[in-house]
Image (cartoon, helix red, strand yellow):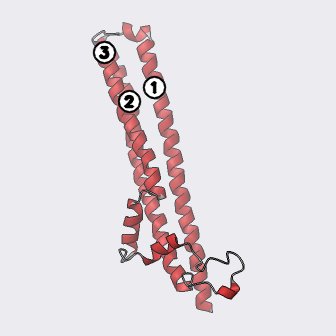
Amino acid sequence: MDHEKKLIELYKKTIKSQQFFAEKGWESIKFHILLSSSLVSITIGALVAMHTSSAFNELGYGARGLLVLILVVLPSLMIAIIELGYKNFVRECKRMYEQSSIFLKLEEKLGFWEDRDEDKRKGFPNEEKYFPDRYREYFTNEEWSNSEDFIKDIMSRKDTLFGIMKKIFIIFEDIGLILIVIISLVAILHLIAFF
């Protein structure tokens, strides 16, 4: 019985660790969305000011070129920040899924994957298992010979936290690249006095 209590305590700690890493992943997403959105707003505001300002048009080519270069730094900085945030998000998700692999093994050890006793089913009387069938898939997947295989598989799926939320980083990186192209195009048009 003492051994079972220790396993249950380990199970609780593992779930708390998984929740901690999930929260860290969400914090990483929120922080980088806020920072990137701010940089996008600043860049677009500066680009509009540059395009509509008569003072900008009165500057010489060297001064205009310097201001454009400074403006290109903002989306470039955003792309660098997004790449760092993405790496951190990957790390947090891998740790979260590693904890999942641990508690899946503990659930097996504690007998959670066994059938429920028919005479003891008060809640959900028609469900024979403690966990839905889709959770059993995790436990019975023969492609996973170890936790690393589990993590790689879960990270490659499109319907997981990582699979869905990594798109946010991709979108903001694409926005940064688009802003660099737009700024460069506007700058070239200004330099050839098209505007």
Residue 193, position as x, y percentages in the image: 30, 9
Q: Residues within 10 Å of mark 1 (few under 14, many from 20)?
A: some
Q: How crowded is mark 3: few (under 14 residues within 10 Å), some or many (20 or more)?
A: few
Can you see residue 89? Answer: no
Q: Which amino acid does label 2 sit on?
A: Leu
Q: Which of marks 1 and 2 is nearer the N terminus?
A: 1
Q: Name the residue under label 2.
A: 179
Residue 190, position as x, y percentages in the image: 32, 13
> Which residue extends farthest right?
122
Q: Are marks 2 and 3 in contact (CB under 8 Å)?
A: no
Residue 19, position as x, y percentages in the image: 57, 64
Q: Going by the image, does 126 lie left or right of 26?
A: right
Q: Residue at x 44, y 12 (%)?
A: 52
Q: Which of 19 and 125 is in front in this view?
A: 125
SS for dot 2? helix
Q: Name the residue under label 3.
A: 189
Q: Residues within 10 Å of mark 2 (few under 14, many from 20)?
A: many
Distance of label 1 from label 2 (alpha carbons) = 8 Å
Q: Going by the image, does 133 lie left or right of 151?
A: right
**Dividing the image into 4 quarters, which one contains the N terminus?**
bottom right
Question: In the picture, residue 89 is in which quadrant?
Answer: bottom left
Question: In the picture, residue 143 is in which quadrant?
Answer: bottom left
Can you see residue 108? Answer: yes
Q: Mark 1 points at which residue?
A: 44
Q: Do the residues labelled 1 and 2 touch (CB within 8 Å)?
A: yes
Q: Which residue is drawn at 40% across and 12% down?
A: 56
